[in-house]
Every structure is written in structure tokens, then in C-alpha cells.
Image (cartoon, rainbow, N blue to C red):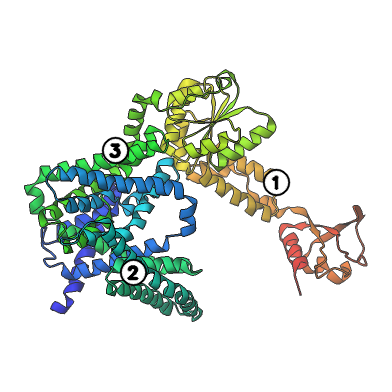
Amino acid sequence: MDKYEIIKEIVIILAVSLPIIFLFKKIKISSVVGLLVTGVLIGPFGLGLIAKPEEIEVIAEIGVVLLMFTIGLEFSLEKLIKMKRLLLISGGMQLISTILLSALCLSLFQIPIKQAIFYGVLIALSSTVIVLKILSDDDLLDTPQGKLSVNILIFQDISIVPLFIFIPLLAEGNTLNLLNIVEKIGTAVIILTAIIAVSKFLVPKILLELAKTRIKEIFIMGVLLLLFGTAYLTETAGLSLSIGAFIAGVILTESKLSHQVVADITPIKVAFNSIFFVSIGMLLNTEFLLRYPLEVLLISISIILLKSVIIALIVMFLKYPLRIAIIAGLTLSQIGEFSFILAQTGKSYALIGQYYFNMFLGASIFTMSLTPFLIKYSYPIGQNIAKFFSKKDIEPFAEPEIRKISGHVIIAGFGLNGRNLAKVLKETGIRYTIIDTNPDTVLYYKNLNEHIHYGDVTQSETLIHAGAELAKIIVFAISDPRATERALQMAKEINPNIISIVRTRFVSETEKLEKLGADEIIPEEFETSLQIFRTVLIKYHIPLNIIMKQINLIRAESYKMLRNDFNVEELIHLDEILAQNLTETFYVTDENTWKGKSLREINIRAETGATVIAIVRDKKPIANPSGDEILKTGDTIVITGTHQQVDDTVQMLNRRD
């Protein structure tokens, strides 16, 4: 039965992980943490359901390869160039400063410099999987702190490849000097360049030929061959499987079929990645954890504080408000999944002993588990700390006229919606001022003579400087729902009479915003639904005034009908309208099939039941045209009949024989 041992182990993983992930989802903890906990429970240091996880580790290695492959697929050079400044400064400063400061702190405890640098590398990386999942679920990716976090995570992911090359240089017996580092990296670059050059020439052609077969199995197997073949080549060349997988992903990014590759590989990746996280959990020595609980806790807290402070300082260096800096710092304060991969690599080079490896695993799982709570409570923590230092966190509004004007509009957030509003207000002569937290945006539009100012809209001082006491309207066009709620509350406290218009992504946020005093709420989610609703009704030739009455009724009830708690009978029944006759027009183009034919030849009434009541030619109407009337280019035919008859007529006139 030994040959079926791997099947038994996979069954155990699935049986235990499913209820744990479901439970963790209910209490809003990442599924990654659930998988780690599963590994701890079933592993050799837990219940012992899987006593020898060697076979599972092989599957986990495949998960790592697939993870690196998908990161390569998301690696777009063009996209990175566009956000190069923020990416390089925020990501580069975070990675380098965290490694160096961590190594410095660890060296104070008599840890050799090579090991200290290696541990610094492990600490520097954050969890892309957990953070992006939480930010996406909470609709925070478009917030300033969300964008900063994504930039830092992208830089960390890109840095994995050079870090894999760098780690062997720290191994015992290697001299850590600049010449040695340059030589090793140079050799690796030459090897990688050769592989990329050959692959880039061949792969797109091969992939296209595979796609032409229209056999899905052949396409997927070809992609997997490319993936594992490239990984095997880099491993043979003295690098690693992970680097090869990353290269394979980068190569396929240039292909027009990359989206199909992602769609086909994602289910496989999810399955293997899950086993990867379970295998990491199996490595955690619970006896060690129980023996050194205070040490693990102290190290975990130290890592969280160190990373939070470093990232917060970098974000503040980029001129973002203190509140955003603190939120970004706490968001990325955990140890990431790639640290596990690097730790395993370092273990093979004797860079980390068993004691420190167990300590690292305990701290990693603890910081990962805390991430959902740290992100959740980073907002009140950031808010309170920023409030304490509020006077230092705001740029004074230099223009004295801002404080004197009244009856103006305050635009909070200068993204697409804010810019469009400002454009309209400028054309209509309505005075306005803008507040934004992005220093680059503020500087750019200040140079264009816009009334824009840097500041955190959640701070009362910022709103006061913007003239909130005398403003008529404040429009919230920011992408951070929590910041919107706080800023709305502050604005109403400063000026209870100010009219507040709030843009929100989801209608579920409407009720809370109403309680905070929002006068108008525009949820993008349901405005899109209304636009679709309007377009559908137009296709059914419903009169525009009836359509607008329907839409206004839905809006007046705060979209309650779309939230399933509205009396639908209040809407006008459209079946009665559809049963009535209507009039429609049809323009005859030069390409029209019926051009040059008489109305008798077309025979609309016999074909559809509709009636042609007029033809407009050269801006002059021909009422009740006879059957001998010939259609000409530029004619507008006026048709009457039921909705169905008119639809059939339009379809017939559009027909191409």
C-alpha cells in the first residue's frame, strides 16, 4: 500500500483544510493562514497524520514553480516603466533598508554578518498573496495606501530572482566582496539572456502552432512543457527551478495568448500552491513553539514594528500623509511566502540552523495570521496618530483667497471623476478647490494653475484650510471607503449645512453613508446597472420620459429595489406601454439594400404589419407616400406600428442580401 501513500496524504490535506478554510473565511482570516494551520495540525509535530512529508514537499516545490511562473506572466516591462519612480523608490528603499537594518540589529546579538544579511532578506519580504487578497476583498487596491503597497510588493516579487542568485554568495567559504558578486550575477545574466533569447524566438511560434490545433489538452501540455523545460534548463545551468519558471512566465507575457495561459494554469496553480502552504505548516515544530513562546512572540512583534516603521518613513519621505504611511506600514509588516522558499534555499547552504529556522517559521506564521487584524485596525491607529501630529502633517494653504471665498465646491480626490468635475466647474464659472494626498498629482496640477492642495481630507485642519465652513458643496471622489466615511463625518461637524455628494463603489456602503449625513450618494455599482437598464429600454423603444421616470424612482429610493427591499409594484408596468403603438424613423444610407426600390416592392405592411406614414427628403416631408415612391440615399422613413412591428421593420430594412 506504500505506493498509494501520496494519495492518502493528499486526501488528508483536502479533508482537513476544507473546514478550516471555511471557518477562517467566516471570521475573515486569509485562506493562506488556514492552509498553514492545516499543515501544523496534520504534520509530524501536530497530530502526526502525515509523519513523513517528503513526498508532499515535492508537490510543494511544483507549487513554488507555478507561483513563480504566474508572477512572470504578470511582469510587464511597459507597465513597470510607467510607474518606475514610485516602484523603484518605494520598493527599492524598503527592500534595501529592511535588509540592512535587520542585519545590523541581528549582528548586535553576535550573529555572523552573512547569516544576519540572510535573515534580513527573509524579514524584508511581505506576503503578496495575503495582502492583495485582503485589499481586493475590501476594495482598497485603488486607495493611496493600496497603490503604495502594490508597488512595494511588485518590487519584492521582481527582486526574488536576483535574491536567488545572491543567496549562494553568502554560503560558507564564499568571499563576500563586490567582485565576487558582480562575477556571479554576470554569469547568471549571460545564462539567463541566452535562454530568454532562444525562447523568445521559438516560444511564440510554438505556442501559436499549439493554439492552431484547437485541442485544449495539447495547448495546456505545451505550456507546461515550456514551464518545466525552462525551469529544468536553469537548474542544470546552476541556478534554480524558480528562476526558470519566472523566465518562462516573462517570455509568455509577450505572447498574444498570455491571457489564455493564465486562465488554463490558474486552477492548477491554486491546487499546488495550497499544498505548498500546507507543507510549510508541517515544518513548524510545535514543541519548539511551546518551549520558546515568549521569544517567538517578541521576534514577531519586533519584525512587525521594524517593517512598519521603515515603510512608514519611506512613504512619508514620498510626501504622503502620516495616516497613509502608518496604514501602508502595518499592511506590509508580515513575513511573506517567498521568504519560506528562500529559507529552504538558505538551509541547503547552511545559512540558517534548525533553531533559527524554527524561530523563523513561528514568527512567519504568527505575523501572517495577524495581517487581517493589522490591516483592519491600521485605519483607527493611523487616524489617531495622524490626529496627534495633525499640524505637522498638513501643508498650509498658501493662497489667502482660499480662506475668504464662500459658496465654493470642495473636490476631495483628483482622480478621473475629480478631474472631470473640475473641468465642468471651470467651464461654468463655479469656484472650487481640490484636496489630494498624492504629492505627484498635487505638484503636476499646481504647475497647471489648478486650485489643488496637498492634505489628508480625514483631518479637520485640512478641511478648514479648504474653506469647509463657508463651502456650499463637498464632493468625495476618493477611492478609500473608510477615509470617505471619516472625512464626511468631519465635514458635517465643521459645516452642518454643507451639501455632501459621495461617490462609492458599492451600494452596500450607502446605508452607513446616509447615517453619517451624506446628501447624495452615487454608487458606481448600481449606476452601471441603471445605464444597462436604460440601454435595454431604449432598444425596446420605451419613450425617454418613461425611462427617466423609472430611473429617478429607483434613485429616489436609494437603490432599494436593487437591494431587494423595495416594493417593485411602485414601478410603472412596461407591458402596457409595449402593447401601444409607437413611431420610429429609419435613415437610408448609400449601402442600403432597399435603395432605389419602391415602397410597393419592399411591401413593409405585408411583411411586418407596420405602416410608412411619411418620408423626409431634402428636409421636406412627403406625407402618406404612395407605393410608387422610390427610396433614395438620405431619405428618412417614418414608420408606425406596435413595438414588435417596428422592430421587425427595422431589422428588415437593415437586412443585407
Task: Rate crowding at label 3 as few (under 14), some (14 to 19) or many (20 or more) other CA atoms within 10 Å.
Answer: some
| Residue at 29 percent of width and 66 percent of height | 63
Q: Are marks 3 and 1 in contact (CB under 8 Å)?
A: no
**Circle number at residue 309:** 3
Query: How many dots with numbers?
Result: 3
* Residue with the mark numbered 1: 544
Q: Nearer the viewer, mark 3 or mark 1?
A: 3
Image quarter of the N terminus: bottom left
Q: Where, by quadrant of the figure, is residue 265 drawn?
A: bottom left
Nearer to us in this view, 276 or 399:
399
Residue 491 lies, with reference to residue 13, above or below; the image says above
* Residue with the mark numbered 2: 244
| Residue at 88 percent of width and 64 percent of height | 632
Task: Rate crowding at label 2 as few (under 14), some (14 to 19) or many (20 or more) other CA atoms within 10 Å.
Answer: many
Question: Identity of the amino acid at label 1?
Answer: Leu
| Apparent side of residue 498 relative to residue 140 in the rendered image (left or right) | right
Which residue ends up furthest to the front in the rendered image?
A: 179
